[in-house]
Structure formats: C-alpha cells, structure tokens
C-alpha cells in the first residue's frame, strides 16, 4: 500500500518542502501518494507571489536579503536571466508609469544580470518557484511509485483515526491520509468595518488588499476616484497600517491616472507614526554603537528580557539622533543575534514568542521605490501620518470617520472626511474567535496547541504538533528549530530553511 501524505495549503512553504522531498522519494522505492490542497488558485506561489498580489508590485527587501541562501538565489538569478524579456513585458503591461521607471532606473543591473541589490517584482519569484515545483511533479508522475494530486478545496476539519487522519472539506467531501502537513499560511485580517451594502458609490472600504485580488481592489478604488472626480469631489484615502501591504496600497493607487486628477490625499495610521525606512545614513552610522547590547557580551546567565531591553535602549539612542532602521538593522540584529546562543532553551523560546516581533516592528525597512512615492506625496502635501492605535471606523452620510487612541493624548482622537479606507493592520492571532474553522477544530480536538506567541503552534523536535501532524510556514512562529529561535516565518529565507528541514523529517518518518 502507498503512504498517503496531505499538504493543507500549497504555498511557498509547501513548495520548498516538496522540492527536496520529491528528490528524496525519487531515489527510494516506497510508494507514496501526495495530496496538495489549497482553497485558492495560488498553487505553489501562495498569495504573496501569486495572482492575488498581482504583477506590478515589488519585493519589500532587496534580492540578497529576500533569498539569503546563496545557492537558491543563484538558481533564481539564472532563471531570471533566461526569462527576462517575457517577465519585463508582463511587468510593463500590468503596471503603470512606476513600472517603467523601475526598469529605467535599474536597466544597467538588469542588463548585466546583477540582481542582488534590486527589489525585484514579486510575481517573478512566484513564476519561478511554480516552475521549479512543476518540474519536480513531472518527475514524480513519471516514476512508478509516486503519485501527486492537486485538490482545490477548503479543509475545515481534521479527524484523528486509528491509522491516520480524515480531512473534512467545506463541500462535505473527505480524504483519508496517513500524515498531514498544515501549511495554511497567515491568518485572515480582522474585519474592522461591517459593510452591509449601504456604502455609497462614492465611498469604499477594503478589508484585505489581496482578496479577491489586489488588481480587483485597485479597480474598485479607481472607480470611486472616477465617480468622485465626475462630481468634482476630491478623495481622501486612509491606509490603516504602515507595513508592506500599506506601502503597496499607496504605491499602486498613486500609479493610477485617476489619483492624479484633483487634490486627492493619503493618510496613514500606524502605532509608531512612521513609515518604514529605506536609506542608510553612513555618516551617522559611524558614530553609532550598540552600547547597551555590548554590555551583555561578557555577562553570564542573561535573559530574554535583558536582551530585549538592551535592544530597545539602543534603538532609542538611534532615534535620538534620527538614525533610521535601514541604518541600524544590520548592527542591531547582529548585536542581539550574537547574544541569543547564551540563552537557555526556555529563554530562547521566550524571546521568540515575546520579543522578536516587537523588535521587528521597530526595524521596518523598505525599498526606495516605495518610499520615493511617499516623499513625492509629502512634497505635494498629499500625505499625512497619524501616530496611534485603531479604535473603530464609523460611516457617516458621505464619509468615514476614524477613531483612534494616541500616545500623545489620553483622550480618543477623531479624524473625519475619509472616502476610501484600506485595512492593512495585519492578521488576527490564534486566540481570536474568528480564526478559520480548521484551526478551531484542530485546537478543540487537542491535535495542536497555540504557543505563547499567539501566532504560532507548538511543535516537537520533528516539527509535529501531534503524531503525524506537521507544521510548516508562518505557524512555526514562536518555536525553536535546531536551537534557532523563530519569531517571524513570513520571510522567504526562513521558509526555505525550515521547509528543507521539514522535508527531511517527513522522509525519515516514512
């Protein structure tokens, strides 16, 4: 009999697990049936690099940071050079003036194949990884002992049986298997406003920039801009969150001709009241040192809290001289990274669950291509930054009202007169009552347990939440893998690394 292995979620983490797993299986003789399950059409590319993110947005990091593993980056660069003309044609066709500017600004690097410092269009990577997986699937299907089946469906429950699992789907169908890899990606956004179909055609609320697709939502925004322009009304766009999604929303809307008609504006609400940084100040950096982290170098029995406190004090020092994250991220990360091996296992897990993401929020960086758009908007007095925490959104007759809490003011604050609102505040956590049914049912059956990060699932040394239930991708946050603390698994380098380890674990357990 064949051993049946099901992947729930067929995005990037599954892709980087499948490639080495199939390679190992091809050299074996054991019969294996692989089932790849996804509720979307983004098989192998996932939402960030597939159709839902479109073909006109760029990586938030340069390529060498996005794929730090040199062998993987070299393979991707070789593929880019071989498929360059087709890729650039698609990028220009789907983008606007900003796509042409990106190509013009980077023409020399593109022509010479010098990709490492470029913020490459995201769909380039999506096409690449999909092609790599498809090549492996072809080899598997040509073998006599591996079968592979794609299933477009939504898994909503997992039943433990004597010999394995039964997966229940939303359409009432089921699938029996021996092993399950839960690789379902990030959790959905928290819905901030209930649109009960009573919003006027001159107003728009978007809860998730990528659902159903970014291009669909951009068209909706364009329609509202055009409708308001016909009535000689200006549009004020509110973006909730200054993360990568928020930057992409501003970038793509700014690139639309309809935005440039009239005095349309952007306002961005974020906790720290700043946009990500993208410019290194080499002069100031020479006078900056991580004095607080340095004091811990020779200390014994240090704790996660001590490291986090030192990091924040050093970041405060950087803030005091207006030295941004792009300048300090390298030295700060190296500073606390060198201290993490001094922590015991419990303290490492505490750092991964409690401190890693908090530090990351203070070290947000982005490419100049995104930030130059913000600069231009600021020069034209069309961009406002609000420091505060979202409270709620109210619908008035012809505008939205934002209520938020501000650290500068103990009272609630209000801002009126927004006409387009885009929610980029991020995902709910695993303790939220609105988590997908699949997760809810798995937790209710004690097949998995939420770790202290609230965004990840506890695993053992074999990357299992329970017997034969493996975890991949973002849900590995807040864990140790090979004594390495992981607090953020939405970074491609970490996904590649952890997925290759997972492939070994699955293969060795056959």
Image (tube, rainbow, N blue to C red):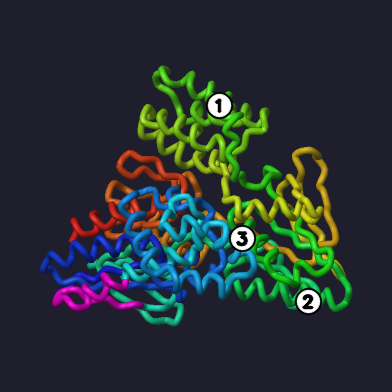
Mark closer to the chain start, 1 or 2: 2
Range of magenta residues: 134-150
Q: Residues within 10 Å of mark 1 (few under 14, many from 20)?
A: few
Q: Which residue is mark 1?
A: 286
Helix, strand or loop under label 3? helix
Quadrant of residue 279 in the image? top right
Residue at 36 percent of width and 54 percent of height: 73
Helix, strand or loop under label 1? helix
On the rendered structure, is 376 left or right of 476?
Answer: right
Residue at 39 percent of width and 75 percent of height: 168
Q: CA distance from mark 2 to mark 3?
A: 21 Å
Q: Which mark is residue 226?
A: 2
Q: Position of residue 180 (x, y in %)?
A: 31, 65
On the rendered structure, is 24 left or right of 443?
Answer: left
Mark closer to the chain start, 2 or 3: 2
Residue at 57 percent of width and 74 percent of height: 94
Q: CA distance from mark 1 to mark 2?
A: 49 Å
Q: Position of residue 229 (x, y in %)?
A: 83, 74
């Amino acid at each position: 009999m064949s051993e049946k292995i099901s992947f729930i979620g067929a995005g990037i983490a599954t892709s980087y697990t499948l490639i080495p797993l199939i390679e190992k299986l091809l050299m074996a003789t054991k019969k294996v049936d692989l089932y790849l399950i996804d509720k979307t059409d983004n098989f192998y590319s996932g939402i960030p690099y597939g159709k839902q993110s479109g073909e006109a947005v760029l990586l938030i990091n340069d390529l060498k940071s996005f794929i730090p593993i040199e062998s993987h980056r070299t393979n991707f660069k070789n593929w880019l050079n071989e498929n360059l003309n087709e890729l650039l044609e698609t990028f220009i066709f789907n983008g606007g003036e900003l796509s042409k500017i990106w190509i013009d600004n980077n023409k020399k690097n593109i022509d010479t194949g010098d990709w490492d410092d470029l913020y490459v269009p995201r769909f380039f990577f999506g096409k690449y990884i999909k092609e790599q997986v498809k090549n492996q699937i072809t080899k598997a299907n040509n073998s006599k002992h591996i079968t592979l089946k794609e299933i477009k469906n939504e898994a909503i429950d997992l039943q433990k049986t004597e010999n394995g699992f039964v997966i229940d789907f939303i359409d009432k169908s089921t699938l029996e298997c021996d092993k399950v890899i839960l690789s379902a990606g990030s959790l959905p956004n928290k819905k901030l406003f209930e649109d009960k179909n009573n919003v006027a055609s001159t107003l728009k609320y978007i809860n998730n920039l990528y659902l159903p697709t970014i291009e669909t939502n951009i068209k909706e925004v364009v329609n509202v801009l055009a409708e308001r322009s016909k009535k000689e009304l200006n549009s004020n766009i509110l973006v909730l969150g200054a993360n990568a999604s928020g930057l992409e929303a501003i970038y793509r809307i700014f690139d639309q001709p309809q935005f440039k008609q009239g005095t349309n504006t952007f306002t961005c609400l974020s906790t720290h009241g700043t946009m990500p940084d993208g410019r290194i100040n080499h002069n100031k950096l020479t006078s900056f040192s991580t004095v607080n982290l340095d004091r811990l170098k020779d200390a014994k029995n240090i704790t996660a809290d001590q490291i986090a406190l030192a990091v924040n004090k050093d970041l405060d020092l950087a803030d005091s001289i207006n030295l941004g994250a792009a300048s300090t991220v390298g030295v700060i990360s190296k500073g606390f990274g060198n201290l993490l091996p001094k922590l015991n296992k419990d303290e490492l897990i505490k750092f991964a669950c409690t401190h890693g993401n908090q530090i990351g929020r203070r070290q947000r960086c982005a490419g100049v291509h995104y930030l130059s758009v913000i600069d231009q908007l600021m020069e034209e007095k069309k961009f406002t930054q609000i420091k505060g925490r979202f409270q709620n959104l109210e619908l008035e007759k012809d505008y939205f009202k934002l209520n938020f809490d501000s650290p500068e003011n103990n009272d609630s604050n209000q801002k009126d007169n927004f006409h387009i609102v885009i929610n980029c505040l991020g995902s709910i956590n695993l303790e939220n009552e609105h988590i997908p049914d699949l997760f809810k049912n798995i937790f209710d059956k004690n097949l998995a347990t939420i770790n202290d990060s609230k965004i990840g699932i506890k695993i053992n040394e074999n990357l299992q939440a329970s017997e034969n239930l493996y975890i991949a991708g973002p849900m590995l946050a807040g864990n140790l893998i090979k004594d390495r603390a992981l607090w953020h698994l939405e970074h491609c380098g970490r996904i590649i690394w952890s997925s290759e380890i997972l492939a070994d674990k699955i293969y060795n357990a056959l």
